[in-house]
Image (cartoon, helix red, strand yellow):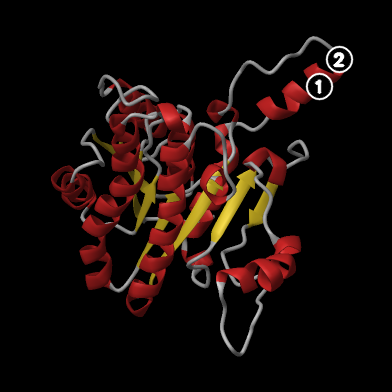
Amino acid sequence: MPGLMQDKVVVVTGAGGGIGRAIALAMAEAGARVVINDVGASLAGEGASATPAEQTRALIEQRGGGAAINTDSVASWASAQKIVQTAMDTFGRLDAVVNNAGILRDVIFHKMTPEDWSSVIDVHLNGSFYVSRAAAETFRAQQSGAFVHMTSTSGLVGNLGQANYSAAKLGIAALSKSIALDMARYNVRSNCIAPFAWSRMTSSIPAATAEQAARLARLQAMTPDKNAPMAVFLCSEAAKDFSGNIFACRHNEIFLMSQSRPVRSVHRGEGWTADLIAEHAAPALKPSLYPLDRSQDAFAWDPV
């Protein structure tokens, strides 16, 4: 039986390892030919090597699939064009893009340097724009295409020590919605996934008791491949009615995430002063204020 991505071509950025590799493998398993983009850098964005991408290609080819490698950075306009051109030169078409490439420079806000900020924004947010924009002309001309962008609950909800990453990831959610709106007329779809995976978590969780060990095992079960089926689905024609939405994948759970909408309102016909806001609006709005919570507060139960 043909897979959901049979005879399609997909670019997966950051596909040399982790979630990106899992998605690339799943795309190939579903019948797609894959452009494996990866600069071979560390999680902090340091160094460069073709080896991770070559390993992903070897795994795809061992399973009978087809893949090409591109080692250009997503973080520049010119190199993003080369990533898309690799698909056209090698396979003659492009049907979907998964913007997965990313780096981390976690540091508490008051110690964050401009370079910490710009390097993360460049790869995550600018990179998602550059690669998407590079593919947009092809998608528009053929009147079809799908984008999947990786956002994060660090941006959708919040997290400590990740102002750069959180800002980029929330920006990606807005970028995806804008692409979905602007390109709907060309039958082009755009969605986000907020992935959960052990590879993105600290390994310092204690396991001194049986209960802690059991919890650790549940967390370690959140392997990168758990996020891949949703990426394949969203890139396929089976998801033709899905666009402009955000999904979170955590082990065997799939969440449709909310988007900002009005929660509560107050009105005075004569208008407001600061004193009236303090006297009237603030007490009315206060019960509906959001707490200063983090991702782990919103997902307060262990993955199932």
Q: Nearer the viewer, residue 233 or 13?
A: 13
SS assignment at label 2 = helix
Q: Eyeballing the image, is 206 above or below 143? A: above
Residue 134 percent coordinates (x, y):
22, 56
Identity of the residue furthest to the front in this view: 275
Q: Residue at x 63, y 15 (%)?
A: 204
Judge from the rendering whether residue 122 lies leftward or rightward of residue 194; answer left or right. left
Residue 302 percent coordinates (x, y):
76, 36
- To which residue does mark 2 refer? 210
Residue 62 percent coordinates (x, y):
41, 29
Q: Residue at x 41, y 69 (%)?
A: 180
Identity of the residue furthest to the right in this view: 210
Judge from the rendering whether residue 283 lies leftward or rightward of residue 64; answer left or right. right
Where residue 214 is drawn, which disc sits there?
1
Q: Residue at x 63, y 85 (%)?
A: 268
Where residue 5 is drawn, which disc sits there?
none
Q: Nearer the viewer, residue 267 or 201?
A: 267
